[in-house]
Image (tube, rainbow, N blue to C red):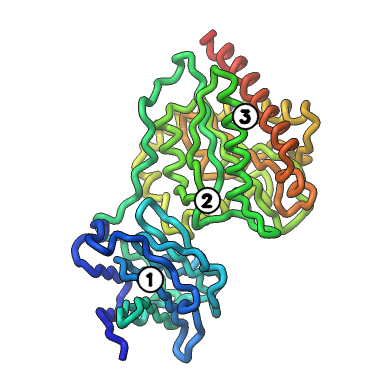
Amino acid sequence: MLNLIRWFSLAAIAILMLAGGAVAQAPTGELSALARLEPARSSMQVTETGLTLTLGISQPVPWRARLLDNPPRLVVDFREVDWRGIEGVRREGVADLRAGIFRPGWSRLVAELRRPMVIERAGMSTDGATTVEVALRPASAQEFSSKASVPEPPGWTLPKPAAISGGNPSDDGRFVVVLDPGHGGIDPGAETEGLKEAELVLTFARELKDLLMRDGSIEVFMTREEDAFVPLETRITVSRAAAADVFISLHADALAEGEAVGATVYTLSDEASDAAAQALAERHDRADLLAGVDLSEQDDMVARVLMDMARTETAPRADKLADALVTSINAAGLRMHRHPHQTAGFSVLKSPDTPSVLLELGFMSSEKDLERLQDTEWRSKMAAAVRDGLVAWARDDAARRGLK
Ligand SMILES: [Zn+2]
């Protein structure tokens, strides 16, 4: 017999705490050790009434389950679960099943649903082995969205931005570059031939950071140093905290359509310069949605007029930066896209006062680009080209602004 600690008949959100108390409370005693997924006891299965997610874990931990929309998905958050082996878990009836670190101390499993479904029941049993079960049943779009739109409970807020000590004011003679390796953790980005965009761009970012630091006059911060999920908003916050002179987001996406080949530099626009650029922007923003972070409220908190004023000055500087990068990458003889400078509505470029660009190093969907991305020599040439472009731009920009 299953000894069910709690079975919830759920309206929208279940917060199941073994120890009780607030969601963000640290577990105590033996609960603090890292729990592991037991893949052999885990599955997502189609049942007579819908879908059932079963997760075997090595020990009880605080957890919760909820629904999120756009696209419809079930999100299950756990304290400190090691998800190794999740790729091998049987998965039926879902578009995707993934898991990873969501923020320090918390990990998240996301099941992307093929149709609107709601939580019928959810519980954890600890009879011999610890098992979490979440049963879903089909629902109307209306019922789903009303349940998915329930706000997060108090105490379950955005993670603190990565702490950066001694933020420095702009125009103090130091040139601060923030590198933003795209994706990470629960969001691997593009995937092909067993390679992940998140890993490829992190490798490049580390190499570029080393090269820039060697210059001596450039200070470099990264929005992530490891394979962890970082919400878009936090990436911008890191940039602000570092008093960045320049923000460069690094990607290597896959595009399903067309023959996208070569490096491309993107700057922010409301309207994307082409459909592929728009698709990319949507995919990047969707990664945040997948992990459950909603940026829309953050926008409201900022005075839009002030942002627009700042952007009026920043946008032409970002354009010049993009052009300088295109020039230096071309000069290095590296392959560029036939439209090397494009615009798109990437949220990560929305910092109002920091010239920001997104550099697609190449496309993982192109065999040749994929080869180049894995080639150490190519990467070092690309890193040198980016440095040259940055240095040239910084000199011109300072002159234009009358700083030097
Ligand atoms: Zn990407």
Q: Which mark is in front, 2 or 1?
A: 1
Residue type, mark 1 in image: Ser
Residue beneath disc 1? 58
Query: Residue 384, position in %: x, y?
Result: 68, 27
Q: Is residue 120 visible?
A: yes
Q: Classify residue 318 by image quadrant.
A: top right
User: Is 62 placed above or below 6 here?
Assistant: above
Crowd rating for badge 1 (residues with CA inside 10 Å; few <14, some 14–19, many 20+):
some
Q: Is residue 146 visible?
A: no
User: Is 120 placed above or below 290 here?
Assistant: below
Residue type, mark 2 in image: Gly
Secondary structure of residue under mark 3: helix
Secondary structure of residue under mark 1: loop
| Front-lying residue, 4 or 331 | 4
Residue at left offset 68%, top offset 41%: 361
| Front-lying residue, 178 or 202 | 202
Residue at left offset 24%, top offset 70%: 18
Residue beneath disc 2? 184
Give the Cα separation between the discs numbered 2 and 1.
Answer: 25 Å
Residue beneath disc 3? 319
Give the Cα separation between the discs numbered 3 and 1.
Answer: 52 Å
User: Earlier along the polypeptide chain: callout 3 or callout 1?
Assistant: 1
Crowd rating for badge 2 (residues with CA inside 10 Å; few <14, some 14–19, many 20+):
many
Residue type, mark 3 in image: Asp
Q: Which mark is in front, 3 or 1?
A: 1
Q: Residue 300 vs residue 40: left or right?
A: left
Residue at left offset 35%, top offset 76%: 130
User: Earlier along the polypeptide chain: callout 2 or callout 1?
Assistant: 1
